[in-house]
Amino acid sequence: GENVEQHPSTLSVQEGDSAVIKCTYSDSASNYFPWYKQELGKGPQLIIDIRSNVGEKKDQRIAVTLNKTAKHFSLHITETQPEDSAVYFCAASIERGRGAQKLVFGQGTRLTINP
Amino acid sequence: KAGVTQTPRYLIKTRGQQVTLSCSPISGHRSVSWYQQTPGQGLQFLFEYFSETQRNKGNFPGRFSGRQFSNSRSEMNVSTLELGDSALYLCASSYAVMGTEAFFGQGTRLTVV
């Protein structure tokens, strides 16, 4: 069945350093990989996503890479800031016609940025 | 543009009762998905609706049901509540015609006592 594994479960970095979170998915048909940031008391916020026809995507300090062969994808945050502290979730989905969707989430990574 | 709105934000129910949660998607979005979030199980998919039809269903018992109205608003119902149903219930909306980006509401925190 579909499964997404996410590592590490907790990550602590110094402000200004980089943070990397890694995910592995099981269903080779997965073709859409979003990342969400969840702050305390809020719902998950979509921060970046990548589709399987792309190997890398960048948005300011955030980048995501995808290795379809290995079924790995990673989130990279550079020049971390205190406001980056949150729980981050990766997810995988199979995009079908008209956007039929079922997101399978990783277990989450609690990222703490130390000032 | 208003985001996804979920009501109520908090609920306390007794075992055996039933509960109905509501979700209003982003204007123009036609797909609504529901997820259960717990510390132990993480985020788990419940079901997805598009144009009033359930298109996908997760591995939850039949006590969990939902529906979508013609204006795309959705409701989720849980009958015969159990202590283990205590969770944050999240609704996500998606345009679902071009692209699959899903945007979440703030959730409904359900506590079963």
Image (cartoon, grey):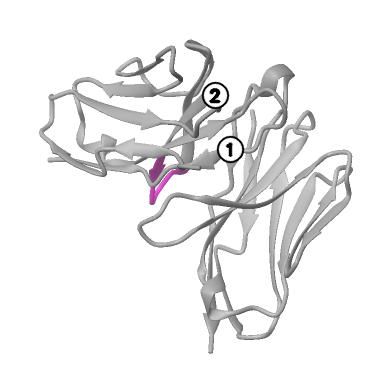
- Decide if residue A3 is on the left or right side of residue A111: right
- Decide if residue A109 is on the left or right side of residue B101: left
Residue A28 location in percent, x, y? 79, 32
Q: Furthest residue to the front?
A: B1
- Decide if residue A79 is on the left or right side of residue A45: right
Inspect the image, locate mark 1, and give the three-letter code of the amino acid beneath it. Answer: Ala
Residue B51's place in the image compared with B82, above or below, is: above
Residue B70's place in the image compared with B21, above or below, is: above
Residue that numbered label 2 is attached to: B31
Q: Furthest residue to the bottom?
A: A115
Q: Give the alpha-carbon distance from disc 2 to disc 1, as whole Å.
A: 9 Å
Q: Residue at x 69, y 19 (%)?
A: A98
Residue A102 location in percent, x, y? 59, 28
**Both marks 2 and 1 on one chain:** yes
Residue A32 location in percent, x, y? 73, 37
Residue A39 location in percent, x, y? 45, 61
Q: Earlier in the sequence, mark 2 or mark 1?
A: 2
Chain to which the residue tagged by mark 1 belongs: B
Task: Locate residue A27: give its quadrant.
Answer: top right
Residue that numbered label 1 is attached to: B102
- Magenta stretch encompasses residue A60: no
Chain to which the residue tagged by mark 2 belongs: B
Which disc, if any, is residue B51?
none
Q: Quadrant of the N terminus of chain A?
A: top right
Pointers 2 and 1 in contact (C-beta within 8 Å) = yes
Task: Locate residue B90: give its quadrant.
Answer: top left
Q: Which residues are magenta?
A: B36-42
Residue B37's place in the image compared with A37, above or below, is: above
Inspect the image, locate mark 2, and give the three-letter code of the amino acid beneath it. Answer: Ser
